[in-house]
């Protein structure tokens, strides 16, 4: 069996030494594994494999499971080779099972003979006649109040033995072995088994030791260890907060911008509080409730016996937690014991601001905290101020200067005393200042009205001829008296009028909007505002462009539309998007080719319900420039033919102009005699969708396709919306479009829309909402002479993950 000993250990230079020799760690034991080692045991040495395990400073373990170790990740194991005090002469080393060779069950036992490939274990051994000893010690256990159970697997060869020790770390003697040696129980048949040891209670700090001894065979002997597990109940070593209890921190913070700085005031940390925790650290913020902690404990831990007025925000940090990572506040892998932050909902400011923050804080001695301004989206730290806890429980005040516009306030743990338990209690948060922060719409509205005086617009539509595109350029000076843009007259319903914003004198020229007078739409009563140009007879080939400068206060939007000159029906409409509402922006809109008389229309509408301000929203426009090749004006436009272009009657939805400007002698579309054929389809002709089509909606990729004798589509994930649309049609009488539909495998909503300026589901007819149809359902939609297209839209229901939608038997 000499060949079975795989660790032939010789000493450098052939001289015998021991670990007690000075600087023994600088002497390398050469482990020579012969081919017999692999043949009989199938293990290979991993040089330096447990170096990270050995260099860890021993700290008290908090949980029995902290001592569990299978050596797959040695750096996480709370065990170490003892390398001082003359307790042993050998070290344990890390080996890995490399093949399926079984251990000789008679010679190498009592552990299992079958070990999985890739399993890692510890091995120590030698082939000297003098006895060699190796000691593996656990990290300290501060106190154990029940009987513990230590389970581990080991293998012995050629007379080597192993024992379990209970060790004490004495200041004057170092590690000291207690006389009591627990018995190792490996069962009746000590083969292919794991062994257990009973560890008695101990109210004093102690360590467990696994000592390999009787390694004294010249032919070689060894001990292998694996799969250490410990079960016990440790004494409570955390700080005693008495009757105070902690619960989950469930607040009203949702990451939405605050409308007023006072919304960040918080003293109850309940559903109305706008503070939450952020990050992925182990320690989490909680809500402390009940009776305050004992005054004696507070005095000992924080230096004050003044109790907090619960509820409060509470963070408990266990002993051994390390430093916070400065590289990435959310990367918990950068540092294993990173701390979470207590962070406010984001704040939006329209300029540099000063924030006044007041709070009370209780914390253990030695902890370092900061209050920071962090960027709302990236969470990068903008500025931090250190907190001096000794000033509390008097109210601590910090003045934070912000130059970023979207930010949040955060309480951050910088460092703690890792040798003790730590805690932080925060209460009575008050936030003020920030005269440029809060409700963005209201602040920007005030900013606009502070700079411009609204007065009526003097321009009017007089059917003046337009000979060149440049005649539609307008800078709105002199109250737009010379502009060929004006508010339309005679519109039914609630419509807001565009006004002229006359610039006031400004002392702060660097923070002003526009350079001169502007067209201003102040939107009241959930009503739109329209600014219309004089008639353009046609736009020739090579599409034109409309350039203008615009601004809105975040609650409103602007659309640029083309309408029929005589019927005010929409031919095309484009929404204008601006990226930053703090200043005006220049936009460029393409104007398509048209061979009939048209007008340009600026359509302003509010996108939200009335808030705290006087207006729902504001839109400002200036410096309109029109560049296109147009037809010169002629006396009448009645000779121009009407072709099959998309047309939508203004007033077909609440978001368009009311249909009140139609003229009796205006040209009318010629009805299509084949409308029944165009709108009817049973999808029985292979993959044909007849004259229907399916286009992508928003960011969804779902489409309808002809499948199994119906139009079929699947909704899931981000592909939540799908739409089928008809070809363009003209009706000379009202009609009904009948159809069947089915929803299976999930929940979906069905909508039918007639063509309109914007295809928004809230302006469409909902025919089915939520759930499955449980078979085919029949429905129909009324069509009028003004309808030009019809859309059937399916949208995934709230909370649904997927759904299958089918449409069939479309008949007029």
Image (spheres, helix red, strand yellow):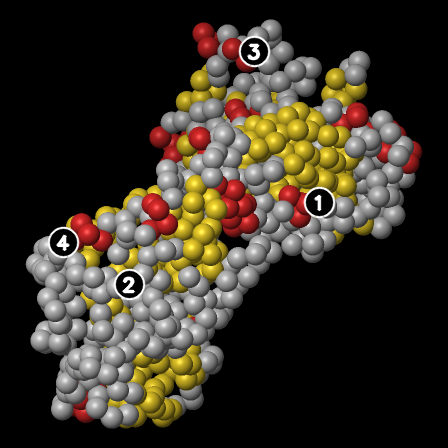
Q: Real-space Cα distance between discs 2 and 4?
A: 17 Å
Residue 14 in the image, given as x and y percentages of width and height: 46, 9
Q: Secondary structure at mark 3?
A: helix
Q: Eyeballing the image, is 718 above or below 156?
A: below
Residue drawn at x 22%, y 53% as measured from the top left: 472
Residue 237 in the image, given as x and y percentages of width and height: 79, 37
Given residues 71 and 212, the one toward you in this image is 71
Q: Eyeballing the image, is 724 above or below 573?
A: below
Image-based side of 166 in relation to 47, left or right: right
Q: Earlier in the sequence, mark 1 or mark 4?
A: 1
Q: Which residue is denoted by mark 1 in the rendering?
A: 265
Q: Which residue is denoted by mark 3 in the rendering?
A: 24
Q: Secondary structure at mark 4?
A: loop
Q: Which residue is denoted by mark 4 in the rendering?
A: 468
Given residues 448 and 716, the one toward you in this image is 448
Mark 2, Cα crowd under 10 Å, few <14 / some 14-19 / many 20+, is some
Residue drawn at x 41%, y 73% as measured from the top left: 654
Disc nearest the viewer among 3 and 1 = 1
Residue 783 in the image, given as x and y percentages of width and height: 30, 87
Cβ–Cβ below 8 Å for labels 2 and 3?
A: no
Q: Earlier in the sequence, mark 2 or mark 4?
A: 2
Mark 4, Cα crowd under 10 Å, few <14 / some 14-19 / many 20+, is some
Residue 447 in the image, given as x and y percentages of width and height: 51, 43
Q: Real-space Cα distance between discs 3 and 1?
A: 62 Å
Mark 3, Cα crowd under 10 Å, few <14 / some 14-19 / many 20+, is some
Q: Quadrant of the C terminus?
A: bottom left
Disc nearest the viewer among 2 and 1 = 2
Q: Which residue is denoted by mark 2 in the rendering?
A: 461
Q: Secondary structure at mark 1?
A: loop
Disc nearest the viewer among 1 and 4 = 4
Can you see residue 341? Answer: no
Q: Earlier in the sequence, mark 4 or mark 3?
A: 3
């Amino acid at each position: 069996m000499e060949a079975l000993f795989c660790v032939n250990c010789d000493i450098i230079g052939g001289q015998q030494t021991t670990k007690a020799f000075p600087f023994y760690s600088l002497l390398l034991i050469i482990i020579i594994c012969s081919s017999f080692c692999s043949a009989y045991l199938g293990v290979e040495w991993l040089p330096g494999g447990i170096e990270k395990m050995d260099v860890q400073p021993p700290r008290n373990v908090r949980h029995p499971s902290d001592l569990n170790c299978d050596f797959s990740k040695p750096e996480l194991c709370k065990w170490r080779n003892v390398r001082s005090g003359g307790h042993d002469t050998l070290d344990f080393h890390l080996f890995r099972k490399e093949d399926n060779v079984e251990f000789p069950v008679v010679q190498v036992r009592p552990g299992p003979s079958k070990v999985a490939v890739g399993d890692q274990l510890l091995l120590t051994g030698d082939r000297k006649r003098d006895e060699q000893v190796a000691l593996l010690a656990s990290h300290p256990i501060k106190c154990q109040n029940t009987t513990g159970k230590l389970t581990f697997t080991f293998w012995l060869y050629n007379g080597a033995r192993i024992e379990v020790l209970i060790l004490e770390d004495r200041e004057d003697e170092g590690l000291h072995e207690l006389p009591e040696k627990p018995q190792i129980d490996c069962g009746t048949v000590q083969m292919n088994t794991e062994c257990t040891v009973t560890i008695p209670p101990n109210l004093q700090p102690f360590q467990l030791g696994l000592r390999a001894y009787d390694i004294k065979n010249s032919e070689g002997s060894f001990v292998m260890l694996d799969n250490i597990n410990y079960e016990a109940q440790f004494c409570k070593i955390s700080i005693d907060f008495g009757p105070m209890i902690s619960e989950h921190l469930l607040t009203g913070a949702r990451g939405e911008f605050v409308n007023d700085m006072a919304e960040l005031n918080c003293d109850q940390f309940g559903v109305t509080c706008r503070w939450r925790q952020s990050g992925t650290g182990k320690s989490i913020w909680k809500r402390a409730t009940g009776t305050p902690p004992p005054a004696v404990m507070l005095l000992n831990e924080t230096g004050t016996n003044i109790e907090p007025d619960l509820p409060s925000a509470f963070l408990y940090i266990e002993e051994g937690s390390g430093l916070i990572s400065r590289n990435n506040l959310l990367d918990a892998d950068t540092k294993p014991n990173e701390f979470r932050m207590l962070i406010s909902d984001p704040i939006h400011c329209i300029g540099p601001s000063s924030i006044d923050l007041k709070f009370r804080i209780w914390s253990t001695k030695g902890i370092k905290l900061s209050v920071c301004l962090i960027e709302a989206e990236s969470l990068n730290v903008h500025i931090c101020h250190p907190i001096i806890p000794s000033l509390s429980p008097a109210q601590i005040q910090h003045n934070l200067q912000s130059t970023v516009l979207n930010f949040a306030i955060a309480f951050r743990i910088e460092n703690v005393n890792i040798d003790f338990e730590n805690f932080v209690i925060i209460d009575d948060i008050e936030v003020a200042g920030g005269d440029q922060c809060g409700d963005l719409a209201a602040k920007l509205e005030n900013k606009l009205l502070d700079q411009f005086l609204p007065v009526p617009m003097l321009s009017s539509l007089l059917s003046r001829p337009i000979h060149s595109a440049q005649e539609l350029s307008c800078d709105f000076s002199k109250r737009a008296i010379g502009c060929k843009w004006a508010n339309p007259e005679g519109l039914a319903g609630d419509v807001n009028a565009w006004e002229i914003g006359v610039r006031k004198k400004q002392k702060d020229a660097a923070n002003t909007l526009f350079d001169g007078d502007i067209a201003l739409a102040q939107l009241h009563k959930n009503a739109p505002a329209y600014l219309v140009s004089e008639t353009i007879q046609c736009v020739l080939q090579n599409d034109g462009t409309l350039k203008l400068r615009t601004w809105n206060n975040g609650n409103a939007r602007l659309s640029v539309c083309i309408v029929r000159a005589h019927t005010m029906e929409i031919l095309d409409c484009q929404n204008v998007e601006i990226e930053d509402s703090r200043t005006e922006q220049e936009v460029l809109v393409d104007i398509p080719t048209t061979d009939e008389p048209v007008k340009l229309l600026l359509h302003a509408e509010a996108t939200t319900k009335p808030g705290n301000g006087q207006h729902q929203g504001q839109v400002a426009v200036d410096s309109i420039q029109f560049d296109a090749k147009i037809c010169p004006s002629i006396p009448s436009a009645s000779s121009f033919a009407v072709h099959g272009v998309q047309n939508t009657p203004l007033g077909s939805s609440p978001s368009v102009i009311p249909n009140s400007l139609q003229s009796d002698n205006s040209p009318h579309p010629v009805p299509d005699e084949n409308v029944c054929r165009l709108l009817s389809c049973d999808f029985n002709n292979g993959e044909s969708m007849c004259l229907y089509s399916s286009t992508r909606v928003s960011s969804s990729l779902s489409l309808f396709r002809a499948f199994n004798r119906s139009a079929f589509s699947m909704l899931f994930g981000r592909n939540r919306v799908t739409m089928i649309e008809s070809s363009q049609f003209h009706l000379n009488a009202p009609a009904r479009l009948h159809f069947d539909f089915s929803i299976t495998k999930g929940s979906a909503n069905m909508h039918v829309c007639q063509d309109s300026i914007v295809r928004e589901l809230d302006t469409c007819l909902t025919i089915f909402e939520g759930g499955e149809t449980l078979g085919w359902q029949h429905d129909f939609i009324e069509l009028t002479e003004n309808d030009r297209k019809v859309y059937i839209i399916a949208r995934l229901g709230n909370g649904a993950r997927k759904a299958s939608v089918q449409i069939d038997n479309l008949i007029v």
